[in-house]
Image: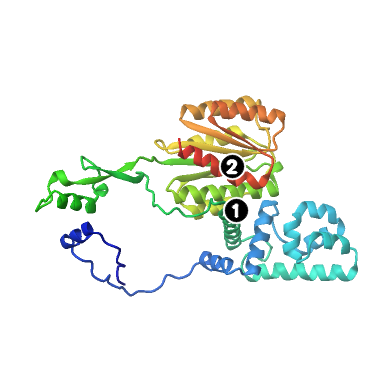
Amino acid sequence: MVIPSLETTKDDEDVERIIPKLDDVDEHSGKLKKQTDEDKLMHSILDDDKETISDGRLISESVTQGIGSLTPDMIFQNLIKDYKLAKKLYGETIIRELTGYSPNYIEKNINIPEFRRELQKKINEKIDGLKDEGLVNKEGTITDKGLTLSALVLYVEELDHLIPKGFGERQSKKKTIYGDKEDYKIFKKDRYRDLAIKQTIKQSLRRGHAEIASSDFVAYDRKSEGKISIIYGIDASGSMKGEKLKIAKKAGIALAFKAIQEKNRVGIVVFGSDIKEYVPPTLDFLELLRRLSEIRASMETDIAKSIIKAVELFPKHDTKHLILLTDALPTKGLIPENETLQAVSKARSERVTISLVGINLDTKGMELAKKITELGQGKLYKVTDLETVDKIILEDYAAIKSG
């Protein structure tokens, strides 16, 4: 493989006389790495394999709706016994992906015996297919492979949603935790990796030096950019079940994708009546993706515990920021509002800032949210349209980056 040539100036030609020309890169032989389930599933999704994508959506929605197992006989009986109740229990996506029919079409034809037989056949075939692919086990419980597929489908859907808005594009300039290469300066006690070799040689040549003098050394003058650790606190209480929780997961994926791409760490705290799941700030995007996809809704809300847990998880020396997403007041604890504000005060003493994304909060909820963000020195976002949640989360991250 030959290194591609670049356009050269006169100075560049002078430099090339000093720096030896690079030869062809040596080629090495070896065995290709065995393709993992993740690789195979992702290839299927990117190749627009509709059956694989349908399976991923079905599993993802089952987790979000809190359905423990996909049992065909039970699902069919629920549909024919009380369709409206079943529609609330399973949601439209599960019914559509399981049967291949729109929920409205099923509602109109559910009492026709021939249609019922066809419906039962479709449900059995779909779940048998999931078992054959190893996405659920014999009992209908979702497997690790199934959870991986659901995570990848969520990820691709979220990127498809963000890229047209300009949020998912890769940056052309490569950033490091030390900052961008903004300009040049005299080399004085800088890191050797910041030594600008080409500029140093050019400077030596312009000065007519036969050898490079210490005064010729030039370093990159970087615009400093410190490490940032963000923890995304997700309310997984009962009121978040369904579409709200699905949107919250996707917003977390967007944050993880953007921040980790820029070498900043992201963690997760999932809170309901207790801390259900947590991931310390990490650069492991796949770990975050899996854990986000597995979140299920519970009953009550305890924001105070999520703040305290986040404080424990943050690294000591990073810029530390917590983004809380919730749709309700805290309901757990003796005096939940006071306990929450005490937790915020503790977080600020540890240099943690707190923003809050409130989904359709009532008047009392907004009052507490204002107190949390004022005391936490963060921002308050009031959400009325769920489709904007990922954009809001990314805007908050951008605000932290800009200081």
Counting from the top left corner in percent of width and height, residue 386 is at: 67, 45
Counting from the top left corner in percent of width and height, residue 162 is at: 57, 53
**Do we see residue 280 in this rendering?**
no
Residue picked out by circle 2: 392
Counting from the top left corner in percent of width and height, residue 333 is at: 65, 29
Counting from the top left corner in percent of width and height, residue 315 is at: 42, 38
Which three-letter amino acid code belongs to the residue tagged 1? Ser
Q: Nearer the viewer, mark 2 or mark 1?
A: 2
Quadrant placement of the N terminus: bottom left
On residue 156, which mark appears?
none
Q: How many marks?
A: 2
Instruction: State the residue at coordinates (59%, 42%).
Output: 392
Measured in 3D between alpha carbons, the distance from the residue under mark 2 to the one under mark 1, in whole angstroms, is 20 Å
Task: Report whether 173 appears left or right of 295.
Answer: left
Farthest residue in the left direction?
Answer: 210
Circle 1 residues within 10 Å: few <14, some 14–19, many ≥20: many
Task: Report whether 245 appears left or right of 106.
Answer: left
Circle 2 residues within 10 Å: few <14, some 14–19, many ≥20: some
- Considering the numbered disc 1 on the image, is that residue within a helix, a strand or a loop? helix
Tell which circle, 2 or 1, labels the residue nearer the N-terminal end. Answer: 1
Which three-letter amino acid code belongs to the residue tagged 2? Ile
On residue 293, which mark appears?
1
Q: Is residue 180 above or below residue 121?
A: above
**Do we see residue 55 in this rendering?**
yes
Pointers 2 and 1 in contact (C-beta within 8 Å): no
